[in-house]
Structure formats: structure tokens, C-alpha cells
């Protein structure tokens, strides 16, 4: 099935099928949600943020970091000049490999997206795009197709009903949690697949490590043990 | 007016205005001390503290050096860092200008007219002239071969390092003449080689090189038209031709252009300017025109163009590549990247296509600086970036200008129970903090804030702070 899906995909986009084209998110639970097991280079990913301060930008940035790990630069497109570079560095992004562009208006912003997505030396383009009509979106998709970059578009909640040319469209919703920072990621649409799943993820409060909510890993063990509910020894059979 | 610079420990006064000097403020004084002196002595005219940037000073000094070309064929800056004086090689000059005394008077008059106060001296060596000008009587002429005047100068004129200066003070050595009584071997063993080198420079035993300041070559081409041009296509053709001419001039010198200035002189005296910037030194005229077109498309000129001028504003040696940035890219990728940066910079503006660098500063807004990517030679920002000291969830990805928010249920010094965002109440479920951020009172209006990372009941995260001066709350960031 997977092979056939890959073949269809290859015919559709004209891109060579290769394992190195896929970018893992660094979180197995999120990768499992995606039919191809990751994000494909040369495609657009739309992150719909249901509420401000919801975590879509951070999650997309983590994918951008994965995309730039081996080579290529990250282009940050930021019309309002509101991105805070120390936060990028805190997420593990090497600021020496970031081109931070601050377009003045929508027209310029779309032009910058187009230029950055077309450049083969760019590994990922990350930014918030509030307004995007169907034609402009299609143009961006054509720009990135066949290139090695990944376009990570952070969109407002209103974009949920608009036409999308993204390969993968994910909804990110913040969730209340007692510990760590929790979000719910939902696949809204995915090209070539009917998969519609969702998963609750959380960032470990101090390390920023991403994992499935409720799962503990080695780093979270101490925090897990400190929870009084875990500390009581079960007396069951 | 005070100019402050960062020294080893905190800020110090780099230079000050006469008014500040009258109040007892001296260059080299710690800023905090200057701030104490300021309000006490005169409340009516407060002092202004300005960050000291040595670069414009150096440029001004270089311009003065070039202006002094009428007194000497070889004029250079002195070798202190930053340079603080000019040195003129007067070999063979005085007889032409009426003797040494007359020459000195002419130089003094020249500076007086330009609004500068100067201390001048003529001596056998650069170091001697510099020392006498600074520490001797004003406008001194040291006769050839005469070392007696130098002997009476204080040892401070040798510009020694602090340790040696203190040693000398302990021994009661105050004048250079006292040093000349010791043997070279004992001076060297006791005070190090720097002292010997300075003495040798003074006497001329050690030759000092004077690096001349020369005006940078001007590469410029222009074309005027009998009938003003209005057609954009035609103007582009002329630009192309001018670019070819200019590129020939620049490339023959082994350099490439980093900033290209295009000036269109319109009828009625209006001038339209474009500045085309490059990431790598370029001599390719077609590339120049392609980038100029990005700006030209958006340029409006009301009337016909009478003259077009093209000048190479900033140039750099062609073999020098932008080494530090994106060093590990392959050559093909590097050129693709250079093209992208150039296109973006020329369309969006040089100041809007940048690289960010962390700065070790507690104040949130000053924790980074932006460096434009195009239009500058590589390696101009040699300062090492500060390391990142935060966890990923500690700093918001989006930072706003602080906006006042209404809060509810603040218990004592703690965070609020809710705040209002765009008219809607956001209940706070969890908060992390406070993280107290304070800036030194000597840096002007002080910043004292208690920051909280707050999570609403819906799981959204924001960055709020309480201004400690008046207990008001502000929203500054969003953990998007």
C-alpha cells in the first residue's frame, strides 16, 4: 500500500521518491499521525492555530529545526517584526543560519514567500501568513514543488474554511494540563490520503522535549515519580 | 552631553562636552560617577548620555587627515586604539611654507577655522611629537637632535600599561629623564619590553611606520540627456550601459561592488535615489541591473530624467567571500543563497533582511541585535554572540510592544487570576514566575519588571509583566 501511495505521489508531483525527502518531527506519535510518516520536502504544511498563544508556531518551528538539521538555512518571514530571536535560539535554532525577513505589506510578503520557497539552498520557510487567497496559495505550492524546502505556514483559525493547497493541513489546539504544556494536533486534510487522526502531545516544561501526552520518557521519569499518584505502590493483584 | 563606552567593568565616559567638563566630569570616569556629578551641579540643564561609537570618530579623523594633505604629502592617524590624533610627515616641507614656526601657525589656523581646538608639536619622531603635543607646552617645536625636552615629560606620555605605570609610581619615577639614568638591561628586566620599545620610538632608535590616509577612489559614471527621458524601458537601457562602463572601472582594480548608488536627476531639480545592495562583491553588470529593477519598478518619478548617475558606494576585494555566514553550504548553494539574499534585500530593504545575534543584556528588548545581510563587507561584526541561556518554553516566540492590560484578582506580589485580552476575560490556570528583570538605574529610565508566563484555562500561554514602579500590568508576548 505504502509503495503504491509513493508511486502515485511521485507521478503527481514529478518528485523523485527517496527516503531522505522525508523529515521526521522528532516525535514518533506525531509522525504516526501522518500517512507518509513525516513531512515531505518540497511541500507546504499549513498549521491552523485555533487560538492565539496556542503553540502552533512552536510546533512548526520544531519541524523547521528538524528540516535544517543537515544543511540549508531557515527563512523566517515576519511581516509584523514580532518574532523574538532569543526564543528561536532557545528552541535550538542556530541564529547564524536564519535569514529573518520583515516584509512591509501583504504583496511583499507573498513575494518573499515565493522567492524563499524557490531557493534550493533554503531548507525551511517558517512564518505566519494571515491572508492568503487560493491563487496565491497555489502559486506558493508550485514554487516549492520540486525544491528541497519545506514551507511551514501558520494560519489563523479563520483559514480553516478557506481553500488550501497545502500537502498537509494540521489543526493545533491548546489544552489545559496540570503538568507540562499540552496541545492537540489534528490532521484536517492530507493530500492523497483520507487519514483524519488526532493526537495529544506535550512539551516537557523544562527541556522542551515533545512527546505524546501521558507518555513518560527517561527525562520525564523524575517528574513522573514526583507525582503523588504514582508514588503510592499499587496493591492490586 | 556625554558619550559612554563599554569598558572592562561597566560603562565609562568616552568623551564629554565642555559643559560636562565644567561639572567635573572627565573622560575615563565610570558612568555612575558622572551621573552622580551631573544633577548636583546643575539641575537646570540635565546631561544626555549617548552610546559611544568610535567608528564615526575614526571617519571624521580620516577626513581631517585628508584635509591636512595641503600641509604634508603623508598624513596618518596615530597608532592608539581608537586613534586620537593625526601625524604629519614634514620631511622637506617647512622651507616651502615659510619655516617650522609659520607652518605650525598655519596648521593651527586651519583647525581653528574648522572649529577644532588642537595641540601641536614638531619633533624628530612621531612618538616624540605626539608625546610633546599631549604633555608638553602648547605648540612646541623640539629642535633636531634635542632630547632634553623629552626628559622633562611625565612617564604617562609613554602610554604604558597600568601595571608598569603603578610600578614606576611606587619607585618614585615620574619623568622620562629619570628612566634614562637606568641601563637598558635593567629597564628591560624590571619593566618589560613595552617600556623599552616606547623609549626607542621616542628617541628614533626604533622606526615607526606611518600609515597614510588616502581618499578612497571614486568610481562613478553618468550620462546626461538633451531631451529628458520618461520611458522606463529606455532608462533601463541607459542603466545597463552605465553599469557596463562602471563595472569595467571597478573590476580592473580587483574589487567588486557591495553597494551601488543610482541617482536619477529629474527635471525641476528633483533627485530619485536607489541603493542596490549585494551579499557578495559583484562586478556583473547584468546582475546589477536585474537587482536595480526590483527597486526601479516601485520608483515613481514625476518628470523626465535629465541625467543618470551610477556610483560604487561600498566596494570590497573580490576574492574575499562572505566566510562566516552559512560557511558549510556547498558552492552552488552559497551562490543560490547569495542571490536570494540580494533579491530580498533589494525589494524589501536592506534593514529588513537581517541576521539576528544574541546580546548579553537583561532587558528583554535589548537581548538581540540585527545585522543586515547585504551591502557590507564580511567580518565587520567581530563581536562574539552571547550564548542562549533559556529553555524553549521560557521565552515567547512573538514579542509585542508592551501593552497595558486590565487584570483581576492579584494576590499580593503574585500573578493575577485573570486578565483581559481584546475585551475578553482570560482566566489564568497556571503561572510560572516571577522572573525579575531590572536594568541599572544609570542607564537612563530604569526598567524594573516581574515577568510571569501564564497559561489560561484553555491552555494558551502569554507573557505578562508587572511594572514594579507603579504595579501596572502589561502583556508583552505570546507563546504561539
Image: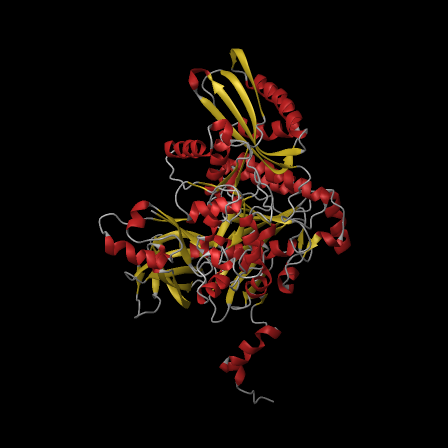
Q: Which quarter of the figure has residue A20?
A: bottom right
Task: Note whether residue B111 is visible.
Answer: yes
Q: Is residue A216 above or below residue A21?
A: below
Eyeballing the image, is A233 above or below B75? below
Q: Quadrant of residue A200?
A: bottom right
Q: Closest to the observer: A203 or B36?
A: B36
Of residues A131 and B339, the one drawn nearer to the viewer in this rendering: B339
Compare residues A24 and A49 and report the one nearer the observer: A24
Image coords of residue A33 (percent x, y): 63, 60
Viewer can see residue A104: no
- The scheme the figure's colours follow is secondary structure
Quadrant of the frame with the N terminus of chain A: bottom right
Tell me residue A123's x, y (percent).
65, 49
> In the rendering, at what x and y percent does residue A74 appear?
60, 49
Question: Which residue in the rendered view is the most extreme toward the top?
Answer: B226
Total numbered circles: 0
Q: Is residue A106 left or right of residue B197?
A: left
Q: Residue at x 44, y 45 (%)?
A: B133
Quadrant holding the C terminus of chain A: bottom right
Q: Position of residue B294 (x, y in %)?
A: 56, 30
Q: Is residue A226 above or below residue B36?
A: below
Nearest to the observer: residue A189 or residue B44: B44
Amino acid at each position: 500500500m505504502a509503495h503504491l501511495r509513493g508511486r502515485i505521489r511521485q507521478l503527481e508531483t514529478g518528485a523523485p521518491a527517496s527516503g531522505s525527502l522525508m523529515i521526521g518531527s522528532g516525535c514518533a506519535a506525531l509522525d504516526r499521525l501522518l500517512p507518509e510518516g513525516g513531512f515531505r520536502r518540497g511541500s507546504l504544511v499549513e498549521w491552523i492555530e485555533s487560538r492565539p498563544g496556542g503553540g502552533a508556531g512552536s510546533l512548526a518551528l520544531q519541524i523547521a529545526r528538524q528540516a535544517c538539521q543537515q544543511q540549508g538555512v531557515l527563512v523566517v518571514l515576519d511581516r509584523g517584526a514580532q518574532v523574538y530571536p532569543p526564543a528561536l535560539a532557545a528552541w535550538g535554532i542556530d541564529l547564524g543560519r536564519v535569514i529573518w525577513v520583515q516584509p512591509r505589506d501583504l504583496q511583499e510578503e507573498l513575494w518573499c514567500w515565493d522567492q524563499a520557497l524557490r531557493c534550493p539552498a533554503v531548507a525551511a520557510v517558517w512564518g505566519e501568513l494571515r491572508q492568503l487567497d487560493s491563487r496565491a496559495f497555489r502559486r506558493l505550492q508550485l514554487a516549492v514543488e520540486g525544491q528541497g524546502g519545506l514551507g511551514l505556514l501558520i494560519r489563523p483559525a479563520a483559514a480553516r474554511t478557506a481553500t488550501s493547497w497545502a500537502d498537509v493541513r494540521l489543526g493545533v489546539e491548546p489544552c489545559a494540563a496540570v503538568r507540562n504544556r499540552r496541545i492537540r494536533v489534528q490532521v484536517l486534510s492530507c493530500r492523497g490520503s483520507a487519514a483524519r487522526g488526532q493526537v495529544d502531545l506535550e512539551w516537557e516544561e523544562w527541556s522542551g522535549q515533545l512527546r505524546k501526552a501521558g507518555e513518560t520518557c527517561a527525562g520525564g521519569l523524575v517528574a513522573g515519580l514526583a507525582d503523588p499518584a504514582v508514588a503510592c505502590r499499587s496493591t492490586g493483584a | 552631553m556625554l558619550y559612554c563606552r563599554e569598558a572592562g567593568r561597566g560603562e565609562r565616559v568616552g568623551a564629554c562636552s565642555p559643559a560636562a567638563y565644567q561639572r567635573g566630569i572627565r573622560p575615563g570616569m565610570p558612568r555612575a560617577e558622572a551621573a552622580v556629578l551631573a544633577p548636583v551641579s546643575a539641575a537646570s540643564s540635565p546631561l544626555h548620555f549617548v552610546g559611544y561609537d568610535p567608528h564615526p570618530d575614526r571617519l571624521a579623523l580620516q577626513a581631517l587627515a585628508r584635509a591636512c594633505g595641503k600641509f604634508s604629502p603623508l598624513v596618518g592617524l596615530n597608532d592608539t586604539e581608537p586613534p586620537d590624533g593625526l601625524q604629519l610627515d614634514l620631511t622637506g616641507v617647512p622651507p616651502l611654507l615659510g619655516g617650522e614656526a609659520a607652518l605650525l601657525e598655519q596648521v593651527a589656523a586651519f583647525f581653528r577655522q574648522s572649529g577644532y581646538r588642537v595641540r601641536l608639536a614638531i619633533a624628530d619622531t612621531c612618538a616624540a611629537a605626539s608625546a610633546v603635543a599631549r604633555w608638553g607646552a602648547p605648540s612646541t617645536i623640539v629642535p633636531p637632535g634635542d632630547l632634553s625636552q623629552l626628559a622633562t615629560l611625565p612617564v604617562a606620555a609613554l602610554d604604558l600599561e597600568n601595571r608598569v605605570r603603578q610600578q614606576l609610581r611606587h619607585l618614585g619615577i615620574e619623568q622620562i629623564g629619570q628612566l634614562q639614568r637606568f641601563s637598558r638591561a635593567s629597564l628591560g628586566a624590571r619593566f618589560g619590553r613595552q617600556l623599552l620599545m616606547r623609549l626607542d620610538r621616542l628617541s628614533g632608535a626604533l622606526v615607526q611606520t606611518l600609515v597614510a590616509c588616502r581618499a578612497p577612489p571614486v568610481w562613478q559614471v553618468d550620462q546626461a540627456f538633451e531631451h529628458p527621458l520618461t520611458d522606463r524601458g529606455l532608462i533601463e537601457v541607459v542603466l545597463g550601459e552605465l553599469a557596463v562602463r562602471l563595472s569595467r572601472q571597478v573590476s580592473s582594480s580587483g574589487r567588486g561592488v557591495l553597494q551601488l548608488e543610482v541617482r536619477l536627476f529629474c527635471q525641476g531639480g528633483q533627485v530619485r535615489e536607489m541603493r542596490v545592495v549585494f551579499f557578495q562583491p559583484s562586478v556583473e553588470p547584468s546582475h546589477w541591473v536585474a537587482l536595480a529593477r526590483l527597486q526601479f519598478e516601485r520608483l515613481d518619478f514625476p518628470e523626465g530624467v535629465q541625467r543618470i548617475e551610477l556610483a560604487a558606494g561600498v566596494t570590497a576585494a573580490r576574492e574575499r567571500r562572505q566566510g562566516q555566514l552559512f560557511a558549510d553550504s556547498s558552492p552552488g548553494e552559497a551562490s543560490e543563497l547569495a542571490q536570494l539574499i540580494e533579491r530580498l534585500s533589494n525589494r524589501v530593504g536592506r534593514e529588513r533582511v537581517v541576521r539576528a545575534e544574541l546580546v548579553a543584556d537583561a532587558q528583554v528588548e535589548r537581548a538581540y541585535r540585527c545585522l543586515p545581510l547585504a551591502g557590507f563587507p564580511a567580518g565587520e561584526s567581530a563581536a562574539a554572540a552571547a550564548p542562549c541561556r533559556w529553555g524553549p518554553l521560557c521565552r515567547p516566540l512573538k514579542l509585542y510592544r508592551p501593552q497595558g492590560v486590565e487584570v483581576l484578582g492579584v494576590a499580593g506580589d503574585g500573578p493575577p487570576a485573570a486578565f483581559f485580552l481584546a475585551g475578553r476575560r482570560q482566566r489564568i490556570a497556571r503561572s510560572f514566575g516571577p522572573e525579575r528583570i531590572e536594568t541599572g538605574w544609570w542607564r537612563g529610565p530604569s526598567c524594573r519588571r516581574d515577568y510571569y508566563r501564564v497559561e489560561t484555562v484553555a491552555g494558551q500561554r502569554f507573557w505578562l509583566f508587572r511594572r514594579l514602579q507603579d504595579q501596572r500590568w502589561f502583556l508583552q508576548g505570546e507563546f504561539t
